[in-house]
């Protein structure tokens, strides 16, 4: 009898051991596959079982959470959703996250281990931290001015603080309300389908994720390259530039929008945006130095703010004719509005390019700091003396050239207009560009640099200009930063 009891005890011990082994296999070695299984609702229930942290602009939240009393309890809400959508992105129970909602999801959802009060605390207690907050660099007044300035027209605005790289405004139009995607009901699916079918692409962040031919605004880069390379030593000397200019190795003749560009000095050619002068300057500088200068400004390099920004490009394998066109922002030169704001910012900041950023710091639910932006990459895009001369040229564009619509009383404003051709045989409606910087008379340095592009200007094709369409929007943004209410 004792022998049978002993056998039964050993058998029960083996069963217990097998149970422990299987539990270890499931909870340790197969935990991730089970957690990531689409049929496992526990993570989603826990994720949406508490309010999400907020994204802050000017110390005030532009996001929130709504208690639905359902299994996935809290849905995301947005204040002025369309205005801030190019920054916040969406947080959807059905379609995931985008932009800041995506890159800062760990903090906002409470999953980031840095939110724990003590190391490994959550691993022991199995608790979930309250969602933390994300403090952005945006200037609410500048964002509003940019959004209202575009007024629904297809286009984008980017504004930065030149000395630090802080992004002050990032607007894309047309936009959408991220709240339409927050839940998981049939209405959300309809909104998703409608937004993705929309030919105007309202969910596209044109300010950071769409590239355009920059047109004549790229002449800032070409002028910097010419000055740094010593091709131009005197702003007022004739440039020996014919008009029209025959592209090297071709019979194609490049012309100007206005007369009087023959042999103009760099000062006058910049003021009146003479294509022939800058095309020839680019050829004289050469591909290597033009490409090096463009890269110093940020072209052909990767950028995250913290979500990834589309790469702005300047081709490094050009013949001389293609280089001439690329030097006036055409051919296959492409740039995001954020990149062109960086170009203007470098001029304003003594030739230094500060890498732009959008998140100032992250906070725990109680308000204590989790992380800060930290130091940012700095590049010397051009010599300080070159930047000083370009500031002079850009200022004259606004005081007496093509950018007078950007002038602000009581402030020094520099700018550059651009009208970019695109499409097959340049058949598309031209893009109207304006890049600029501004400082109040009482400031020691420029406070803001702006880039504006308008894709679908309503005027007749011949009347579409950066000075007429984009400069007033840039002025409104700069005024909002210089004169905070």
Image (spheres, rainbow, N blue to C red):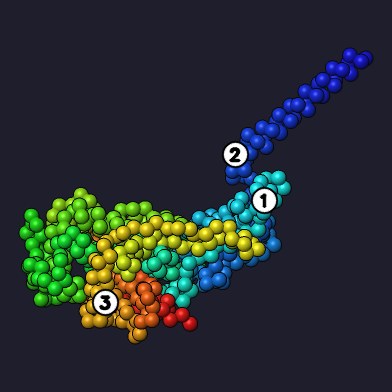
**Residue 107: quarter of image:** bottom right
Q: Residue at x 29, y 55 (%)?
A: 295
Q: Could you give the CA–CA distance between mark 1 and mark 3, rounded to whole angstroms? A: 54 Å
Among the 4 quarters of the image, the one containing residue 52: bottom right
At label 1, counting other C-alpha atoms closer than 10 Å, the crowd grade (few under 14, some 14-19, many 20 or more) is: few
Kindly tell me whether residue 261 is visible in this rendering.
yes
The one of 70 and 60 positioned closer to us in this rendering: 60
Could you tell me which secondary element the residue under label 1 belongs to? Answer: loop
Q: Earlier in the sequence, mark 1 or mark 3?
A: 1
Pointer 3 residue: 395
Q: Write the residue at 25% across / 54% down.
A: 292
- 340 relative to 399, above or below: above
The residue at the point 59 percent across, 43 percent down is: 36
Residue 75 visible to an observer of this rendering: no
Discs 2, 3 touching: Cβ within 8 Å: no
User: From the viewer's perspective, is 50 left or right of 239?
Assistant: right
What is the CA distance from the residue labelled 2 to the residue labelled 1? Answer: 28 Å
Tell me the number on the disc at residue 118. Answer: 1
Mark before the other along the chain sequence, 2 or 1: 2
Of circles 2 and 3, the one toward us is 3
Q: Residues within 10 Å of mark 3 (few under 14, many from 20)?
A: many
- The numbered mark at residue 33 is 2
Locate residue 418: give its quadrant. Answer: bottom left
| 328 shown above or below 47 | below
**Numbered disc 3: secondary structure:** helix
């Amino acid at each position: 009898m004792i022998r049978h009891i002993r056998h039964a005890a050993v058998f029960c011990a083996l069963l217990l051991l097998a149970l422990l082994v299987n539990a270890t296999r499931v909870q340790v070695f197969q935990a991730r596959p089970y957690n990531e299984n689409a049929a496992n609702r526990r993570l989603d229930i826990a994720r949406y079982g508490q309010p999400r942290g907020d994204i802050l602009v000017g110390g005030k939240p532009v996001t929130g959470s709504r208690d639905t009393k359902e299994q996935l309890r809290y849905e995301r809400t947005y204040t002025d959703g369309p205005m801030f959508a190019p920054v916040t992105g969406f947080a959807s129970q059905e379609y995931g996250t985008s932009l800041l909602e995506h890159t800062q999801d760990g903090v906002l959802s409470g999953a980031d281990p840095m939110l724990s009060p003590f190391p490994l605390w959550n691993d022991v207690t199995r608790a979930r931290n309250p969602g933390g907050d994300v403090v952005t660099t945006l200037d609410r007044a500048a964002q509003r001015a940019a959004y209202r300035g575009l007024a629904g027209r297809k286009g984008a605005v980017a504004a930065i603080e030149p000395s630090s790289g802080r992004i002050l405004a990032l607007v894309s139009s047309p936009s959408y309300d991220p709240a339409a995607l927050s839940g998981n009901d049939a209405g959300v699916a309809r909104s998703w389908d409608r937004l993705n079918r929309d030919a105007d692409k309202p969910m596209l962040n044109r300010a950071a994720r769409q590239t355009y031919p920059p047109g004549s605004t790229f002449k800032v880069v070409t002028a910097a390259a010419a000055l740094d390379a010593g091709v131009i030593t005197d702003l007022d000397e004739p440039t020996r530039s014919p008009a029209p200019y025959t592209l090297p190795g071709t019979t194609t003749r490049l012309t100007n929008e206005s007369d009087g560009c023959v042999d103009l000095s760099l000062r006058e050619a910049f003021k009146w945006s003479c294509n022939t002068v800058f095309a020839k300057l680019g050829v004289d500088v050469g591909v290597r130095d033009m490409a090096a200068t463009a890269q110093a400004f940020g072209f052909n390099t990767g950028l995250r703010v913290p979500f990834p920004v589309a790469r702005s490009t300047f081709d490094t394998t050009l013949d001389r004719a293609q280089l001439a066109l690329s030097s006036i922002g055409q051919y296959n030169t492409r740039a995001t509005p954020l990149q062109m704001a960086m170009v203007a910012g470098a001029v304003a900041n003594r030739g230094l390019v500060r890498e732009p950023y959008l998140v100032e710091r992250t906070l725990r639910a109680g308000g204590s700091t989790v992380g800060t932006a930290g130091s940012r990459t700095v590049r010397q895009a051009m010599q300080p003396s070159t930047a000083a001369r370009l500031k002079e040229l850009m200022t004259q564009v606004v005081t007496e050239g093509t950018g007078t619509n950007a002038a602000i009383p009581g402030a020094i404003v520099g700018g550059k207009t651009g009208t970019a051709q695109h499409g097959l045989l340049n058949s598309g409606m031209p893009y109207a560009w304006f890049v600029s910087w501004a400082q109040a008379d009482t400031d020691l340095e420029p406070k803001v640099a702006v880039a504006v592009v308008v894709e679908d200007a309503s005027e007749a094709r011949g009347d579409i200009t950066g000075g007429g369409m984009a400069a007033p929007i840039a002025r409104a943004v700069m005024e909002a930063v210089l004169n905070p209410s």
